[in-house]
Image (spheres, rainbow, N blue to C red):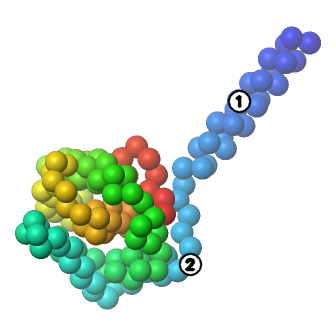
């Protein structure tokens, strides 16, 4: 009886491991897939005039994705966005410095992001969503968690 229980436990553990491996895959809606395949140019400017800070994102489909797929403004707290952005920026900048390991066409310029500066909600919201868009479109992982919407 004890041997039967042990075998049953091993089988359940194996099934759990197989299911856990499959849950890490991203799924895209048909709308999101269409946006990723869009080749027309989008330019999104993210700025905070009081800090004289600006980011310009030239990425086909990002503006459409931001307004149709991404969570609306106010969904995330500014604290959450700042924490995630700091993680993403740190990993992004590391990849810029390693062009032989990471695609230099994807990681072209470093991002100057200081976690001690309050860039405001809009800057953090758009930057965070760009990182989510980028990771989903190019199948990249800038952190240990899966970029979900």
Seen in the image, is 18 located left or right of residue 4? left
Looking at the image, which is closer to me, 59 or 148?
A: 148
Looking at the image, which is closer to me, 67 or 43?
A: 67
Rendered position, 148 above or below 65: above
The answer, for residue 66, to whether it is visible in the render is yes
> Residue 146: x, y in percent?
46, 52
Where on the picture, by quarter, is residue 65? bottom left
Question: How many numbered markers are drawn?
Answer: 2
Seen in the image, is 78 located left or right of residue 69? left
Rendered position, 7 above or below 40: above
Q: Residue furthest left?
A: 52
Which disc, if any, is residue 51?
none
Q: Badge 2: few (under 14), some or many (20 or more) residues near its Cα, within 10 Å?
A: few
Instruction: Identify the image quadrant of the N terminus.
Output: top right
The answer, for residue 54, to whether it is visible in the render is no
Looking at the image, which is closer to me, 124 or 37?
A: 124
Q: Residue furthest top?
A: 2
Seen in the image, is 11 located left or right of residue 60? right
The residue to which callout 2 is attached is 30
Q: Identify the residue at horizontal 67%, vertical 44% (top origin).
A: 19
Tell me which numbered mark, 2 or 1, is placed earlier along the sequence.
Answer: 1
Q: Identify the residue at horizontal 45%, vertical 64% (top origin).
A: 75
Dot 1 falls on a residue whose secondary structure is helix
Dot 2 falls on a residue whose secondary structure is helix
The residue to which callout 1 is attached is 13
> Residue 66: x, y in percent?
39, 76
Q: Identify the residue at horizontal 56%, vertical 64% (top origin).
A: 27
């Amino acid at each position: 009886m004890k041997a039967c229980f042990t075998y049953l436990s091993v089988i359940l553990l194996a099934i759990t491991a197989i299911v856990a491996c499959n849950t890490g895959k991203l799924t895209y809606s048909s709308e999101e897939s269409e946006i990723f395949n869009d080749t027309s140019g989008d330019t999104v400017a993210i700025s905070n005039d009081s800090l004289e800070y600006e980011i310009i994102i030239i990425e086909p489909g990002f503006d459409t994705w931001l307004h149709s797929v991404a969570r609306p403004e106010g969904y995330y707290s500014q604290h959450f966005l700042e924490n995630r952005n700091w993680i993403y920026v740190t990993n992004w900048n590391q990849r810029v410095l390693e062009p032989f390991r990471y695609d230099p066409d994807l990681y072209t310029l470093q991002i100057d992001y200081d976690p001690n500066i309050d860039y405001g909600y809009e800057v953090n919201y758009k930057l965070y969503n760009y990182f989510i868009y980028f990771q989903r479109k190019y199948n990249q992982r800038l952190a240990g968690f899966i970029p979900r919407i």
